[in-house]
Image (tube, grey):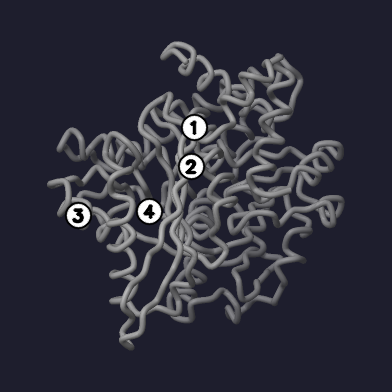
Amino acid sequence: MSGFEEVNYYFRRAARVMDLSANVEKMLITPYREVKVDVSVTLDSGELGTFIGYRVQHDKSRGPMKGGLRYHPTVDMDEALGLASLMTWKTAVVNLPYGGAKGGIAVDPATLSPRELERLTRRFVEQIHDIIGPHTDIPAPDVNTNAQVMAWIMDEYSKLHGFSPAVVTGKPVDLFGSKGREEATGRGAVFALEEYLKDAGGGEVRGKTFAIQGFGNVGSWAARILHERGGKVLAVSDSQGGVQSPEGLDIPKLVEHVKRTRSVTGFPGSDPISNAELLVLDVDVLVPAALGGVITEANAREVRARVVLEAANAPTTPRADEILTERGVTVLPDIWVNAGGVTVSYFEWAQNIQQFTWEEDKINAELHRHMREAYATLARVVREHRVSFRTAAFIVAIGRVGRATVLRGV
């Protein structure tokens, strides 16, 4: 299945439980707008570089559309469609006043100089500025984009529309960004796990063992917070490979190692492990925190963790999800687990609109409240309908988006 087909598979599974009509299904699945633009810039060599940019706006019934921008060679319309629809359901699950959007540029940013990357970003804004805005569509960082890229977007948009810090989130704190935003997705994932463990009688994070695939922003912060809470992170990996230790990795030292070497590989006192081996390691909790589609029909039966905490977007394919559920493995789904990032993005946007800064303690407390209240709703739906957490999340999201759509009028 394509990414969009996978999301719609989960949607339809929940829709059957809800007994939605075919017409309502089609209306809720169909994107509001799909945009494809030419992004041509002069490279440092003087040659012309031509790239393709995308922005898919899926739904606006609950508020401005919200979603990241990624710079990656695999970015295409289908990927943007799938991720944009995922954002619609994600923001609804944690009850944020947003719809869903996603996009990016098909480019390998590692091949560009910082000056070329800035020119590319500003040119992209020139191409899409009329369809984004603080009350229309609010981009954010995603794969291979960061606070600096968001600062360029804010600046370029403001040249065209006047001072507009709320047009993007994930900005540097010194340029109207929010405290707590960098670690928000990883922190939110830990909050999600803690809520589940308390409810399932599994106690707390302390003493539990973890394997984390992906040590970028999300995976590294999740590892740090789990380590601080007494969890034992036995293995982590990145695109170059992985490391493991049966006694648990020293996460603060590993973070320093990654800052020096730009990879987890070669960490002193650890043994190497491949990404494939990490996914089937004997741990309490598996945390896929990299790209999507890593748990598949081919390896789902080998997964030994009892809980899969989906910190990445769409890390589990539909068939793998079915296999894990049949085996009694609890999958805590991405549209709830990794919603911490968009939740604190909402806080950043609210601060920009208010022109008032919140302290980090308030931000973390509000994030915890959103994740806790979302879990309470999901757990109730799981019990009422006897469905998985993923299906419950889609039931909650579809209900909220559907009601807003009907109330606004078709």
Kind of residue indicated by mark 1:
Met
CB atoms at circles 3 and 1 under 8 Å apart?
no
Q: From mark 4 to mark 1, how far is it between C-alphas? A: 17 Å
Q: Mark on residue 371?
A: 1
Corner quadrant of residue 67? top left
Which sits earlier in the primary sequence, circle 2 or circle 3?
Answer: 3
Closer to the camera: disc 2 or disc 3?
Answer: 3
Q: Which amino acid, mark 3?
A: Leu
* Residue neighbourhood size for the residue with mark 3, other residues' Cα within 10 Å, grouped as few (<14), some (14–19), many (≥20): some
Q: Where is residue 333 in the image (x, y as percent from the top left)?
A: 63, 39
Element at badge 3? Answer: helix
Residue occupied by mark 4:
182
Read off the residue under disc 2. 188
Please tell me which of labels 2 and 1 falls first in the chain.
2
Query: In this rendering, is residue 392 above or below 171?
Result: above
Residue identified by numbered label 3? 175
Residue 242 is left or right of residue 31, and the answer is right
Cα separation, mark 3 vs mark 4, equals 14 Å
